[in-house]
Amino acid sequence: MNMLSFTSLASYWSAPEVATNILIFVNLVGALCLGMLVGYERAYHGRAAGMRTYGLVCMASTGLTVFVGYPAYWYGGLTAISGNSDPTRVVQGIVTGIGFLGAGVIMKEGLNIRGLTTAASIWTSSAIGVLVGVGFYAAAISLTVLSAVCMVWVAKLENWLPSRAGVAVTLEFCKGFAPREEILRKVALERGYEIAGDSLTISSHNHQTKWRFIAVALDSKTGTSVSELARMINVYEGVESFELTHCRN
Protein backbone atom coordinates (compact mmCIF):
# COMPACT_ATOMS: atom_id res chain seq x y z
CA MET A 1 0.00 0.00 0.00
CA ASN A 2 1.25 3.47 -0.86
CA MET A 3 2.06 5.17 2.46
CA LEU A 4 1.51 8.60 0.87
CA SER A 5 -1.98 7.81 -0.38
CA PHE A 6 -4.94 9.84 0.82
CA THR A 7 -6.31 6.86 2.74
CA SER A 8 -3.04 6.39 4.58
CA LEU A 9 -2.76 10.04 5.53
CA ALA A 10 -6.43 10.23 6.51
CA SER A 11 -5.93 7.38 8.97
CA TYR A 12 -3.97 9.76 11.19
CA TRP A 13 -7.14 11.83 11.53
CA SER A 14 -9.69 9.01 11.79
CA ALA A 15 -12.38 9.18 14.45
CA PRO A 16 -10.69 6.67 16.84
CA GLU A 17 -7.33 8.42 16.33
CA VAL A 18 -8.79 11.86 17.08
CA ALA A 19 -10.64 10.50 20.13
CA THR A 20 -7.34 9.12 21.46
CA ASN A 21 -5.66 12.47 20.86
CA ILE A 22 -8.44 14.28 22.71
CA LEU A 23 -8.01 11.94 25.67
CA ILE A 24 -4.27 12.68 25.64
CA PHE A 25 -5.06 16.40 25.49
CA VAL A 26 -7.23 16.13 28.62
CA ASN A 27 -4.36 14.40 30.40
CA LEU A 28 -1.95 17.14 29.30
CA VAL A 29 -4.22 19.90 30.62
CA GLY A 30 -4.61 18.12 33.95
CA ALA A 31 -0.86 17.62 34.25
CA LEU A 32 -0.20 21.28 33.41
CA CYS A 33 -2.62 22.48 36.10
CA LEU A 34 -1.22 20.15 38.76
CA GLY A 35 2.38 20.99 37.87
CA MET A 36 1.61 24.72 38.04
CA LEU A 37 -0.02 24.19 41.45
CA VAL A 38 3.15 22.59 42.81
CA GLY A 39 5.29 25.25 41.12
CA TYR A 40 3.29 28.06 42.68
CA GLU A 41 4.37 26.95 46.14
CA ARG A 42 8.01 27.27 45.01
CA ALA A 43 7.39 30.58 43.27
CA TYR A 44 5.60 31.98 46.33
CA HIS A 45 8.68 31.30 48.47
CA GLY A 46 11.00 32.95 45.96
CA ARG A 47 12.64 29.78 44.68
CA ALA A 48 14.27 29.56 41.25
CA ALA A 49 11.95 26.97 39.67
CA GLY A 50 8.39 28.29 39.45
CA MET A 51 5.04 27.57 37.86
CA ARG A 52 6.30 27.50 34.27
CA THR A 53 9.13 25.06 34.97
CA TYR A 54 7.00 22.66 37.00
CA GLY A 55 4.08 22.92 34.56
CA LEU A 56 6.23 22.15 31.52
CA VAL A 57 8.03 19.22 33.12
CA CYS A 58 4.84 17.67 34.48
CA MET A 59 3.03 18.07 31.16
CA ALA A 60 5.92 16.70 29.10
CA SER A 61 6.23 13.71 31.43
CA THR A 62 2.54 12.99 30.92
CA GLY A 63 2.90 13.27 27.15
CA LEU A 64 5.75 10.74 27.16
CA THR A 65 3.83 8.38 29.42
CA VAL A 66 0.24 8.42 28.19
CA PHE A 67 0.95 7.61 24.54
CA VAL A 68 2.54 4.28 25.56
CA GLY A 69 -0.93 3.05 26.52
CA TYR A 70 -2.26 3.27 22.96
CA PRO A 71 0.16 1.29 20.74
CA ALA A 72 -2.68 0.28 18.41
CA TYR A 73 -2.96 3.90 17.27
CA TRP A 74 0.75 4.57 16.75
CA TYR A 75 1.64 5.60 13.19
CA GLY A 76 -2.03 5.97 12.31
CA GLY A 77 -2.64 2.31 13.13
CA LEU A 78 -1.00 1.34 9.82
CA THR A 79 2.14 -0.30 11.19
CA ALA A 80 2.08 -3.37 13.35
CA ILE A 81 4.61 -3.26 16.20
CA SER A 82 6.64 -6.47 16.24
CA GLY A 83 7.79 -8.16 19.41
CA ASN A 84 11.40 -7.11 18.78
CA SER A 85 10.47 -3.47 18.16
CA ASP A 86 10.07 -1.24 21.20
CA PRO A 87 9.76 2.49 20.38
CA THR A 88 9.82 3.34 24.08
CA ARG A 89 13.54 2.51 24.10
CA VAL A 90 14.04 5.16 21.45
CA VAL A 91 12.04 7.61 23.56
CA GLN A 92 14.22 6.80 26.57
CA GLY A 93 17.35 7.64 24.60
CA ILE A 94 15.84 10.86 23.29
CA VAL A 95 14.77 12.28 26.66
CA THR A 96 18.09 11.30 28.24
CA GLY A 97 20.09 13.07 25.54
CA ILE A 98 17.85 16.12 25.58
CA GLY A 99 18.22 16.22 29.37
CA PHE A 100 21.97 16.76 28.99
CA LEU A 101 21.30 19.46 26.38
CA GLY A 102 18.85 21.22 28.68
CA ALA A 103 21.32 21.10 31.57
CA GLY A 104 23.76 23.09 29.44
CA VAL A 105 21.51 26.16 29.39
CA ILE A 106 21.12 26.35 33.19
CA MET A 107 23.42 29.04 34.53
CA LYS A 108 24.24 29.82 38.16
CA GLU A 109 25.28 33.41 38.79
CA GLY A 110 26.07 33.88 42.46
CA LEU A 111 22.84 33.09 44.29
CA ASN A 112 20.77 33.33 41.09
CA ILE A 113 19.83 30.40 38.88
CA ARG A 114 18.77 31.12 35.30
CA GLY A 115 17.66 28.96 32.41
CA LEU A 116 15.45 26.44 34.21
CA THR A 117 12.38 27.32 32.14
CA THR A 118 14.44 27.22 28.94
CA ALA A 119 15.75 23.77 29.88
CA ALA A 120 12.21 22.58 30.65
CA SER A 121 10.95 23.94 27.31
CA ILE A 122 13.75 22.09 25.44
CA TRP A 123 12.74 18.88 27.17
CA THR A 124 9.08 19.57 26.35
CA SER A 125 9.96 20.04 22.68
CA SER A 126 11.41 16.52 22.68
CA ALA A 127 8.06 15.22 23.95
CA ILE A 128 6.33 17.11 21.12
CA GLY A 129 8.69 15.47 18.63
CA VAL A 130 7.93 12.02 20.04
CA LEU A 131 4.17 12.57 19.73
CA VAL A 132 4.62 13.70 16.12
CA GLY A 133 6.83 10.69 15.45
CA VAL A 134 4.19 8.18 16.54
CA GLY A 135 1.49 10.02 14.61
CA PHE A 136 -0.41 11.70 17.46
CA TYR A 137 -0.53 14.98 15.57
CA ALA A 138 -3.45 16.56 17.42
CA ALA A 139 -1.84 15.75 20.78
CA ALA A 140 1.47 17.21 19.58
CA ILE A 141 -0.27 20.40 18.44
CA SER A 142 -2.13 20.70 21.75
CA LEU A 143 1.11 20.19 23.70
CA THR A 144 2.77 22.89 21.59
CA VAL A 145 -0.06 25.35 22.22
CA LEU A 146 -0.19 24.57 25.94
CA SER A 147 3.58 25.00 26.22
CA ALA A 148 3.48 28.38 24.48
CA VAL A 149 0.60 29.50 26.72
CA CYS A 150 2.50 28.29 29.78
CA MET A 151 5.69 30.19 28.90
CA VAL A 152 3.92 33.43 27.88
CA TRP A 153 0.98 33.76 30.22
CA VAL A 154 1.94 31.81 33.33
CA ALA A 155 4.71 34.36 34.02
CA LYS A 156 2.02 37.05 34.10
CA LEU A 157 -0.11 34.83 36.33
CA GLU A 158 2.83 34.43 38.73
CA ASN A 159 3.19 38.22 38.92
CA TRP A 160 -0.53 38.61 39.59
CA LEU A 161 -0.73 35.96 42.32
CA PRO A 162 0.54 36.73 45.84
CA SER A 163 4.21 35.87 46.08
CA ARG A 164 7.35 36.47 48.10
CA ALA A 165 10.03 37.92 45.87
CA GLY A 166 13.64 37.19 46.67
CA VAL A 167 16.66 39.49 46.52
CA ALA A 168 20.20 38.11 46.35
CA VAL A 169 22.37 40.22 48.64
CA THR A 170 26.16 40.39 48.82
CA LEU A 171 27.63 42.52 51.61
CA GLU A 172 31.35 43.23 51.97
CA PHE A 173 32.18 44.72 55.34
CA CYS A 174 35.05 46.98 56.31
CA LYS A 175 38.24 45.38 57.57
CA GLY A 176 38.03 44.51 61.25
CA PHE A 177 34.23 45.01 61.37
CA ALA A 178 32.39 42.05 62.93
CA PRO A 179 28.73 41.95 61.75
CA ARG A 180 26.11 40.34 63.95
CA GLU A 181 23.56 38.06 62.34
CA GLU A 182 20.74 38.82 64.80
CA ILE A 183 21.02 42.56 64.14
CA LEU A 184 21.01 42.02 60.39
CA ARG A 185 17.93 39.81 60.63
CA LYS A 186 16.17 42.40 62.77
CA VAL A 187 16.92 45.18 60.28
CA ALA A 188 15.69 42.96 57.42
CA LEU A 189 12.39 42.27 59.22
CA GLU A 190 11.87 45.99 59.78
CA ARG A 191 12.16 46.46 56.02
CA GLY A 192 9.68 43.64 55.22
CA TYR A 193 12.22 40.89 54.49
CA GLU A 194 13.51 37.78 56.17
CA ILE A 195 16.84 36.09 55.50
CA ALA A 196 16.44 32.56 54.17
CA GLY A 197 18.22 30.45 56.77
CA ASP A 198 19.74 27.99 54.31
CA SER A 199 21.12 30.71 52.04
CA LEU A 200 23.59 32.51 54.31
CA THR A 201 27.21 32.09 53.22
CA ILE A 202 30.04 33.80 55.14
CA SER A 203 33.59 34.16 53.82
CA SER A 204 36.61 36.13 55.00
CA HIS A 205 39.81 37.33 53.35
CA ASN A 206 42.47 39.51 55.00
CA HIS A 207 40.18 40.15 57.99
CA GLN A 208 37.46 41.41 55.63
CA THR A 209 34.15 39.59 55.95
CA LYS A 210 31.74 38.98 53.08
CA TRP A 211 28.17 37.78 53.52
CA ARG A 212 25.96 36.34 50.79
CA PHE A 213 22.30 35.52 51.41
CA ILE A 214 18.80 35.69 49.96
CA ALA A 215 16.33 38.12 51.51
CA VAL A 216 12.74 37.00 50.92
CA ALA A 217 9.88 39.51 51.17
CA LEU A 218 7.28 38.71 53.83
CA ASP A 219 4.66 39.41 51.14
CA SER A 220 4.39 41.30 47.86
CA LYS A 221 3.11 44.48 49.52
CA THR A 222 5.38 45.00 52.54
CA GLY A 223 8.75 44.34 50.93
CA THR A 224 10.87 47.45 50.36
CA SER A 225 11.92 48.04 46.75
CA VAL A 226 15.43 47.05 45.69
CA SER A 227 16.39 50.68 45.02
CA GLU A 228 15.25 51.66 48.51
CA LEU A 229 17.17 48.72 50.00
CA ALA A 230 20.28 49.91 48.18
CA ARG A 231 19.87 53.41 49.62
CA MET A 232 19.54 52.06 53.17
CA ILE A 233 22.44 49.62 52.88
CA ASN A 234 24.61 52.43 51.54
CA VAL A 235 24.45 54.17 54.91
CA TYR A 236 24.56 50.99 57.01
CA GLU A 237 27.47 51.04 59.44
CA GLY A 238 30.38 48.80 58.50
CA VAL A 239 29.34 48.04 54.90
CA GLU A 240 32.10 48.85 52.44
CA SER A 241 30.42 47.55 49.28
CA PHE A 242 27.32 45.60 48.34
CA GLU A 243 25.43 44.03 45.44
CA LEU A 244 21.67 43.47 45.06
CA THR A 245 20.01 41.41 42.34
CA HIS A 246 16.53 40.03 41.88
CA CYS A 247 16.42 36.30 42.62
CA ARG A 248 14.28 35.02 39.74
CA ASN A 249 14.24 32.19 37.24
Image (cartoon, rainbow, N blue to C red):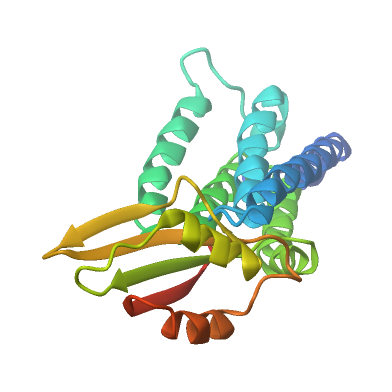
Residue 7 in sight: no
Position of the N terminus, as image quadrant, is top right
**As drawn, which residue projects farthest toward the left?**
206
- The answer to which image quadrant residue 186 occupies is bottom right
- The answer to which image quadrant residue 22 occupies is top right
Residue at horizontal 78%, vertical 46%?
Answer: 33
Residue at horizontal 57%, vertical 45%?
Answer: 127
Which one is in front, 57 or 92? Answer: 57
Q: Estimate the x, y position of residue 124 in percent, counting from the top left.
A: 57, 50
Say left or right for 101 vs 56.
left
Q: Estimate the x, y position of residue 180 in percent, counting from the top left.
A: 39, 58
**As drawn, which residue projects farthest toward the top?**
83
Residue 79 in sight: yes
Residue at horizontal 50%, vertical 87%?
Answer: 231
Which one is in front, 4 or 227? Answer: 227
Q: Estimate the x, y position of residue 55 in percent, counting from the top left.
A: 67, 49
- The answer to which image quadrant residue 108 occupies is bottom left
Q: Estimate the x, y position of residue 97 in percent, counting from the top left.
A: 37, 42
Say left or right for 175 vs 43.
left
- How many badges with numbers are in the image? 0
Residue 10, placed above or below residue 23: below
